[in-house]
């Protein structure tokens, strides 16, 4: 088998794809299986209650065809960014937690959060936010951050990471190389920052470095353009940022996952055809597509890029191998979730009571 054919066969491992509904449609299941998609990303529209969610995740995992499990991912930070609400413990946002100034309490909270996610079959949480809330005009970070200085944010991020890992759920720090000092929301436009590389090393990079040292093997990129790092491409599409800085300088060895590739910061400037190729060539290992239609389109565009020799098959194979290696390390052996008992492990009154007493909520 040629390298290109091998890369085409393994390409699906590089995708984390969203889909519609609270049950898995037959055509979605067929695509997950046939394309050997690496994982899924879940949203509020996929959720009704813990039992339903566990059943859905079991259905997704049935598409793995005897191979390693799929990554089951979600944004479950707390506050406004919590996809599963009714039936789960309602979590305070990071800024509220940070006011207590206790990494010890956050470690315990992180364990509670991870235990609830694990109970329904989620194995990756796109949290904690490692951005520093350094710009009061920032429309997207704000209270999602654990503070306004690198030392306090680093300590809290480390505590969150360690709590999740202790419960067997992978945390994912975000958004590298930092989304705190922006005035634009990348969901709607392309944010720009102008901090020097030295300034980023002294401030924005430090919470990420602390997270990596604490065992975090996932990092999410920012759709943010910094002309001092790369005059053309935002971090998600920048080899300078993801390979030269993150991999080579910072010696990060885990998975690099894109933020949602359907955000306008990417689609309006780089196009749905070229953006996924640019992201992989830059150093992304996994690409998030919140909708199935966009995920299928990107998958087809990358197959075409491989056929036309516009995408290095070695990059695809490297990322697929890293994803599979971490699955073997963290997800194997796999067994389906007992959906009936899932609700008995989430939204517990004692957890809510602990939150109130610990954080004064």
Image: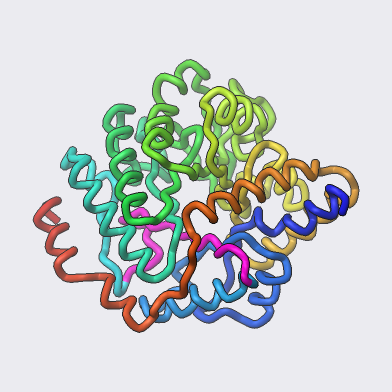
Picture quadrant of residue 256: top right
From the viewer's side, name the closer residue of 7 and 140: 7
Counting the numbered discs, the total is: 0
Residue 110, compared with residue 35, is above or below; it is above
What's the magenta region?
66-85
Residue 280 or residue 326, whichever sits in front: 326
Instruction: Tell me: 317 left or right of 345.
Output: right
Residue at image location 43% in from the left, 52% down from the top: 170
In the rendered image, residue 155, in percent from the top left (x then y), is placed at 28, 34
> What's the residue at 66%, 69% (across, down)?
32
In percent of width and height, residue 87 lies at 29, 74
Residue 138 at x, y percent in the picture: 41, 38
Quadrant for the N terminus in the image: bottom right
Please tell me which residue lies in front, 224 or 49. Answer: 49
Q: Name the outermost residue toward the right.
A: 308
Most foreground residue, 36 or 98: 36
Quick check: is 123 in the magenta stretch? no
Q: Residue furthest front?
A: 333
Do we see residue 135 in this rendering?
A: no
Q: Quadrant of residue 67?
A: bottom right
Q: Residue at x 21, y 70 (%)?
A: 348
Q: Is residue 83 magenta?
A: yes
Q: Is residue 238 above or below residue 38?
A: above
Please name the residue shown 35% across and 44% down the image: 161
48 shown above or below 126: below
Q: Viewed as shown, does residue 301 lie left or right of 231?
A: right
Q: Quadrant of the C terminus?
A: bottom left
Q: From the viewer's perspective, is 273 left or right of 219?
A: right
Q: Work out whether 139 lies above or below 25.
A: above
The percent position of residue 241, horizontal first and vertical second, equals: 60, 29
The residue sitting at the top extreme is 198
């Amino acid at each position: 088998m040629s390298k290109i054919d091998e890369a085409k066969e393994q390409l699906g491992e590089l995708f984390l794809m969203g889909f519609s509904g609270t049950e898995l449609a037959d055509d979605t299941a067929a695509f997950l299986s046939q394309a050997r998609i690496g994982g899924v990303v879940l949203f509020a529209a996929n959720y009704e209650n813990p039992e339903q969610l566990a059943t859905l995740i079991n259905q997704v995992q049935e598409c793995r065809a005897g191979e390693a499990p799929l990554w089951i991912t979600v944004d479950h930070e707390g506050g406004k960014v919590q996809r599963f609400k009714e039936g789960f413990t309602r979590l305070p946002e990071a800024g509220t937690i940070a006011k207590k100034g206790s990494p010890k309490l956050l470690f315990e909270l992180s364990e509670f959060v991870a235990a609830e996610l694990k109970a329904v079959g989620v194995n990756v949480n796109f949290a904690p936010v490692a951005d520093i809330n350094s710009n009061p005009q920032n429309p997207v970070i704000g209270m999602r951050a654990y503070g306004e200085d690198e030392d306090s944010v680093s300590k809290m991020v480390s505590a969150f990471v360690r709590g999740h890992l202790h419960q067997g759920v992978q945390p994912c720090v975000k958004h590298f190389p930092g989304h705190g000092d922006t005035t634009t929301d990348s969901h709607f436009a392309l944010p720009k920052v102008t901090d020097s590389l030295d300034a980023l090393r002294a401030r924005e990079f430090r919470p990420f470095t602390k997270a990596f040292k604490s065992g975090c093997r996932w990092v999410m990129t920012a759709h943010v353009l910094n002309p001092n790092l790369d005059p053309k491409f935002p971090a998600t599409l920048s080899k300078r940022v993801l390979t030269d800085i993150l991999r080579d300088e910072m010696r990060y060895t885990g998975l690099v996952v894109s933020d949602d590739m359907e955000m306008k910061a990417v689609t309006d400037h780089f196009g749905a055809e070229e953006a996924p190729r640019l992201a992989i060539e830059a150093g992304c290992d996994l690409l998030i597509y919140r909708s199935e239609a966009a995920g299928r389109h990107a998958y087809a565009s990358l197959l075409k890029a491989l056929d036309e020799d516009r995408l290095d098959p070695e990059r695809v194979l490297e990322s697929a191998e890293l994803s599979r290696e971490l699955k073997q390390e963290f997800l194997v052996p796999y067994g389906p979730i007992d959906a009936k008992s899932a609700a008995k492990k989430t939204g517990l009154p004692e957890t809510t009571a602990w939150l109130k007493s610990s954080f004064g909520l």
